[in-house]
Each structure stands twice: as structure tokens, then as C-alpha cells.
Image (cartoon, rainbow, N blue to C red):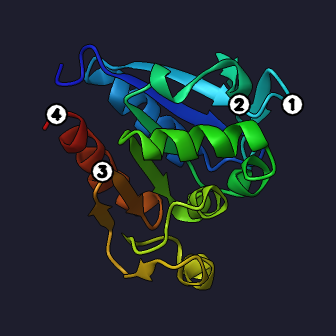
Amino acid sequence: MKLTGKRIAVLAENNYQELELWYPLLRMREEGAEVRVIGTGTAKTYTSKYGYPVTVDAAADEVSADDFDAIIIPGGYAPDLMRRSEPMVRLVREAFQKGKVIAAICHAGWLPISAGILKGKRVTSFFSIKDDMVNAGAEWVDEEVVMDGNLITSRKPDDLPAFCRAIIAALTK
């Protein structure tokens, strides 16, 4: 139980990628972390790309960066909806500025772009948003997981084991 006492937010919105939300959520709980699902506030339950539901514990405007040690952002098309929520953008920005772990996989890079936290960072993502990441000032590389300070990024569901190992490692240093 490496993460006992750690508090982690997993962000949610409609059209999230199932594995990218549920795998880290369950893996972090398995390690003893207190994991809360945080939504944009538009609903109490969000559905994945294939209709699988997740119920949120709170909306982004009901929590603070100080409530968490890490924020995990799943991909799918949910990050495009998340980045339209000022409370969610602010949560990610403030958590990053306070040195909390920000972990984004696949299309989740869209939210850190909108939070303005990628300039000068080495990152990865699903290849289709590479230009977005570069235009935000990041150095994009094609690797399964990239750690740059308190920012962790991964490319796709196949990278989830490495992504979760990186999050656990960052939270246990």
C-alpha cells in the first residue's frame, strides 16, 4: 500500500476513454490512495465513449488544489469538454503551480494546454495532438511515459502500466 495517505483526483466529463479513467483510478486505490472523481459540474454522472458511467464525488468548483497530491486526467474527447470549464482549468493550473503531480494521458494534454502549464516541458500524448502540444511551447517526444518535474504524460491505453508506475513513483519519492 505505497500510496496510503495520498489524495488523488481523477477528472471526468462525457466521452472519457474507459481504460484511461478506470485503470488509474482502481490502480491508485489498490495502492491505498484516497481517490475522488471530480467533474466539471455539468452532471453527477458522466458516460464514456461507449456509454460506461462514472459518478463524480464533487465538481471542480467544490474542491481546491490543496485537497490533492495528484490529479489524473484521462483522455478520450472528455478533455475537450474539461478545458471549457474554468474551475477545472484553474484546478489543474493551481495544482501544477503548487508542485502537485499532474498526470495526463492520450488526448488529456488538451487540458494542461488550456491551463498554460506546458511551456518548456518535455511531454508526450496521442500523436494527433502533437501539434497542439508543440504550439503550447512543449517539446513533444514519442515515448510511452514522460516525466518532467511534476508533469507526467503518456500516449495511449497501451501505456497505462508505465503511466501508473510513474504516478506511483512520483508520489512515493
Q: Distance of mark 4 from mark 1, alpha carbons?
A: 34 Å
**Viewer-proximal residue, 160 or 135?**
135
At 58% from the left and 76% from the top, the residue drawn is 136
Location of the N terminus by quadrant is top left
Residue mark closest to the camera, 2 vs 3: 2
> Is residue 56 shown to the viewer in this render?
no
Q: Amino acid at mark 1?
A: Thr
Q: Is residue 48 above or below residue 116?
A: above
Whether pointer 2 and pointer 1 mark residues with C-beta atoms closer than 8 Å, the reply is yes
Mark 1, residue position: 42
Whether pointer 4 and pointer 2 mark residues with C-beta atoms closer than 8 Å, the reply is no
- Lateral position of residue 79 relative to residue 65, left or right: right
Secondary structure at numbered mark 2: strand
Q: Is residue 139 above or below residue 71?
A: below
Q: Amino acid at mark 3?
A: Pro
Q: Distance of mark 3 from mark 1, alpha carbons?
A: 31 Å
Mark 3, residue position: 161
At 31% from the left and 64% from the top, the residue drawn is 145
Q: Distance of mark 2 from mark 3, alpha carbons?
A: 24 Å
Mark 2, residue position: 39
Residue mark closest to the camera, 3 vs 1: 1
- Lateral position of residue 110 relative to residue 36, left or right: right
Mark 4, residue position: 172
